[in-house]
Image (cartoon, grey):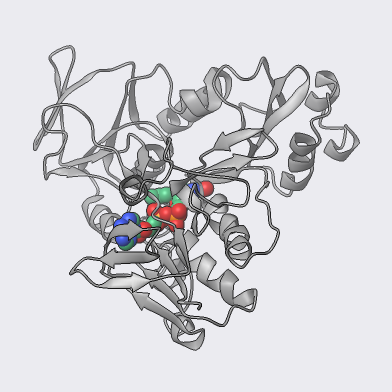
């Protein structure tokens, strides 16, 4: 008997999974359980348009409020799932209710890491993950406010751009020698350091944070950076407690195969929480990006319904900071590439960058250049070696490489 499909985690991946189940023609009960009070919303605007006050709240939601009722999807918001019993095919909700399932999708996403220093868990420390976080920061980013951001990753830098745009004094503290060094490598990371300095951010690199305090941050050299607003953006960790306690295989995320099935055949995972085997790379990868949470659910839904589906999309993400818009397509890890090739005007921040290994393009990034993700994706997917001179030459169409 079909007792229905339960989705734990009412974020982008959870909402898209519900949509995909109905699109696949599934007519049984679908229940979407989320511990936030809001119906599913997208997070990218929280550090961009919504944080800047340019985007309306209604725009951040994945579906209109009445979509769920219209599609027979039961929303259990403000309700955490506290346990999963794969053998008994049931999820326990806070309060003790047991929700039976035939198939379960874990779309529990990820949560901000805390800094392991004194004060790291202080209540004055802000993070940016939820709608409420974005609203509070927007109110705090005022002209003259001293905003200190620990961590020059995507969230830290986007928040820095929003705070500067709002007229705040912004200091960014980063342990590495450049922002985004681990994801972009030194060649391209420099572009982001220059960008923020050009916009008046006090970007302090190679610094050690010793203590977080309500009035500022104490550094390794004994100095203190005073703060009215203290935001920590030092990465996220996948929410895997449910899966771990249920005895599922967890290794930097809930491990799945290429169909997004976990180590239990009736339990699936998608989005930030999943460390999914990727056929293109021949190993599991965990991707903490919007496009992954958008697209994996269709494969998870088809798989839950017993259809043949494989997730093998080339990873993609984007950022917007000041007047710089960027898209990144592919997957280049630190130490995994041997050459970076630029095409276009790097100083003018209108260029492409490619990460190569043995002449093959692992990833490509377009900065303030648009409509090139399709040929970049094709280059990455093809795995063919390209001539770096021609790759650098804007006169050679990417499709002809
Ligand atoms: C501020 C911000 C800006 C971003 N900008 C970009 C960007 O520009 N480009 C890009 O590619 N990506 C961006 N991302 C990343 C992108 O938003 C994530 O990859 C995406 O949100 C992942 O979706 P998800 O549904 O897997 O997880 P989440 O969005 O984390 O949703 C998971 C949901 O499950 C809930 N949950 C967890 N455990 C339980 C439980 N036990 N019971 C019930 N509910 C539970 C969580 O509270 C959460 O609501 C950004 C993220 C943030 C925070």
Please tell me how many numbered marks the rendered image carries.
Answer: 0
- Residue placed furthest toward the top: 221
In-front residue for pair 369/126: 126
Taking the spot 43% from the left edge, 57% from the top edge, the residue there is 106
Most extreme residue toward the left is 214
Judge left or right: residue 327 versus residue 133: right
Q: Position of residue 196 (x, y in %)?
A: 42, 32
Q: Is residue 362 visible?
A: yes
From the viewer's side, name the closer residue of 357 and 266.
266
Q: Quadrant of the C terminus?
A: top right
Q: Residue at x 69, y 28 (%)?
A: 354
- Which residue corresponds to the image point at 52% horizontal and 52% vertical from the top-left? 290
| Quarter residue 385 falls in | top right
User: Taking 185 as reference, is 131 left or right?
Assistant: left
Percent position (x, y) of residue 307?
68, 64
Q: Residue 36 at x, y = what percent?
A: 29, 64
Q: Is residue 44 visible?
A: no
Residue 94: x and y in percent read 21, 66
45 lies above or below 395: below
Q: Nearer the viewer, residue 239 or 265?
A: 265
**Farthest-out residue, bottom:** 70
Task: Note whether 383 is above or below 155 in the view shown.
Answer: above
Q: Residue at x 79, y 31 (%)?
A: 383
141 sits to left or right of 50 = left
Q: Quadrant of residue 398?
A: top right
């Amino acid at each position: 008997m079909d007792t229905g499909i339960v989705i734990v985690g009412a974020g982008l991946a959870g909402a898209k999974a519900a949509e995909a189940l109905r699109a696949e023609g599934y007519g049984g009960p679908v229940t979407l359980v989320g511990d936030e009070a809001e119906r599913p919303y997208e997070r990218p605007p929280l550090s961009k348009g919504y944080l800047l006050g340019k985007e309306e709240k209604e725009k951040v939601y994945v579906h209109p409020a009445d979509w769920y009722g219209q599609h027979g999807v039961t929303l259990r918001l403000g309700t955490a799932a506290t346990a999963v019993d794969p053998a008994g095919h049931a999820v326990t909700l806070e309060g003790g209710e047991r929700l039976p399932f035939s198939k379960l999708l874990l779309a529990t996403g990820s949560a901000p890491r805390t800094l392991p220093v004194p004060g790291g868990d202080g209540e004055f420390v802000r993070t940016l993950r939820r709608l409420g976080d974005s609203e509070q920061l927007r109110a705090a980013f005022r002209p003259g406010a001293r905003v200190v951001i620990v961590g020059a990753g995507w969230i830290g830098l986007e928040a820095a751009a929003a705070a500067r745009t709002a007229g705040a004094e912004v200091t960014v503290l980063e342990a590495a020698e450049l922002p985004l060094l681990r994801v972009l490598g030194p060649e391209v990371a420099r572009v982001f350091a220059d960008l923020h300095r050009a916009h008046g951010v006090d970007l302090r690199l190679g610094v050690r944070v010793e203590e977080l305090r309500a009035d500022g941050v104490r550094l390794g050299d004994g100095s203190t950076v005073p703060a009215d607003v203290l935001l920590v953006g030092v990465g996220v960790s996948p929410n895997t407690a449910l899966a771990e306690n249920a005895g599922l295989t967890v290794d930097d995320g809930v491990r799945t195969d290429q169909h997004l099935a976990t180590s239990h055949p009736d339990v699936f995972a998608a989005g930030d929480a999943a460390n999914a085997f990727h056929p293109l790379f021949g190993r599991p990868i965990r991707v903490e990006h919007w496009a992954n949470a958008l697209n994996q659910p269709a494969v998870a839904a088809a798989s839950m319904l017993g259809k043949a589906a494989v997730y093998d999309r080339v990873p993609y993400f984007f950022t917007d900071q000041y007047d710089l818009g960027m898209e990144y397509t592919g997957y280049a890890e630190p130490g995994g590439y041997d050459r970076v090739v630029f095409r276009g005007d790097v100083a003018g921040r209108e260029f492409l960058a490619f990460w190569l290994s043995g002449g093959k393009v692992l990833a490509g990034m377009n900065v303030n250049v648009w409509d090139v993700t399709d040929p970049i994706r094709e280059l990455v997917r093809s795995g063919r070696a390209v001539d770096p001179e021609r790759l650098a030459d804007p006169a050679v169409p990417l499709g002809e490489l």
